[in-house]
Amino acid sequence: MTNREPWSKRHKQVSRGARFSLSNSFAQPLDSKQLIELARARGDHALVEMFHEHSLEYTPMGGSLDLRSQIAECYGAHITADNIIVFAGAQVALQTVARALLDESSHSIVFSPGYQSLQDAPRGEGGQMTTIHLRPEDGWQIDLTLVEAALRPETKYLVINEPYNPAGTLMSAELQEQLVDLAERNDLYVLSDEVYRLLEHDSLDRLPAMADVYTKGLSLATLSKPWGGCGITIGWLALQDMELRQKLIDVQYFGTACPSRASEIQALMVLRSSDEILSRNLVIIRRNLALLDQFFEAHEDLFEWVRPKAGAIAFVRFKGPLSSEELGVELARVSVSIKPAYVFTQDLQRYGDYFRIGYGEQAMPAALEAFAQFVEEHEEAWRDQRASVRRG
């Protein structure tokens, strides 16, 4: 992994201690008591007993069979327990794939803005990398002509993120089919970060998992985003390529080899109550999204966005006189946290007026109210400053 500093480090220092968070990216977090109550309500007393009495011996490399079997139910017929690798969170999976697939002769293609590890993990293995910039005027969609133009004989690895972080947008099924076709023709591995999959605001928009539709595809997932199981620290990869799976297991020996059994059992509790948890979280997300619709309609001269279709995040452009970094500093002074553009890209000339907000939590309306109050206190001055710049 590259030794560059985390882009979000500055954000955490600026926003530390903020009372109102619009920067969180997950759905409403669960707690252990809720999980146990859900398990008991469905009569899963054996699982509750297992949680309280499990052995502290090592778990198997790649995760225990019961959890891998449960995860496989999230996918189609091509994916069984043998096609799942469990990790201590999704972050380490990104590094593991890069190390297993790439070397100094490899070329990878990534997209920006985006989660830093998606963009940086391939670089950490010493190969060449092309970054393709997504554009709001394209609805943050991947332009396959740019992908084709970036291909080289040594291109081996394509990293995508659908649903897309930071904007919450989603490619069409037709575009996904075209991307898979391009990957097949060029013998590319495709890692699809799908951590917001299952949080589509309309389930009819849901795409098939990359691991289901492409033999060299890898689907990355985590309990953190859709289910709010952040502290369980369980993520996984699903893939059809069993030769690659063994390479990943071999690399995993040198990382966090064995997930916690307590975390695995909590993961089982979450996934066995998936319908109830996801339904609850989508109610919260849709309610909060409606509040954002009202806010942006009332302040359309100061903010614009590509309205998200999935997940609990949106990428917003501030059209006032401040950069998103400056806006973030000012908001932190009134105890409101956002994520400025520098958390997702180093190209601040292109994206410096964008910031990400999260709306997956029950407390979001109070944070939005504090944000709206700040805007109302400053909007007249912002408009005057903007008009002055135009006249000048």
Image (cartoon, grey):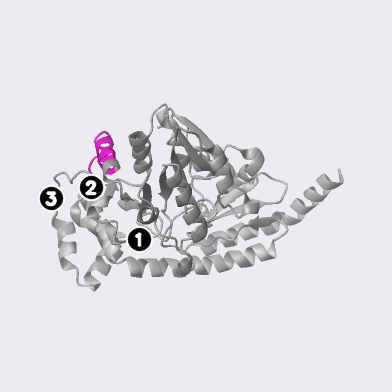
Q: Quadrant of the N terminus?
A: top left
Q: Which mark is residue 30?
A: 1
Q: Are marks 1 and 2 in contact (CB under 8 Å)?
A: no
Q: Label 3, secondary structure: give it.
A: loop
Range shown magenta: 245-259
Which mark's residue is nearer the viewer, 1 or 2? 2
Position of 212 compared to 182: left or right?
left
Query: Does 277 appear in magenta?
Result: no
Distance from label 1 to label 2 (Cα)? 18 Å
* Location of residue 290 by image quarter: bottom right
User: What residue is at 41 percent from the left and 61 percent from the top?
Assistant: 28
Q: Amino acid at mark 2?
A: Ser
Q: Residue furthest right?
A: 391
Image coordinates for residue 148, horizontal then vertical, percent: 54, 42
Q: Amino acid at mark 1?
A: Leu
Q: Between disc 3 and disc 2, whose residue precedes?
A: 3
Position of 373 compared to 224: left or right?
right
Q: Which mark is residue 55?
A: 3
Q: Which residue is mark 2?
A: 260
Q: Is residue 340 above or below residue 368?
A: above
Q: Between disc 1 and disc 2, whose residue precedes?
A: 1
Mark 2 residue crowding within 10 angstroms, few (<14) / some (14–19) / many (20+): many
User: What residue is at 34 percent from the left and 43 percent from the top?
Assistant: 93
Q: Are marks 3 and 2 in contact (CB under 8 Å)?
A: no
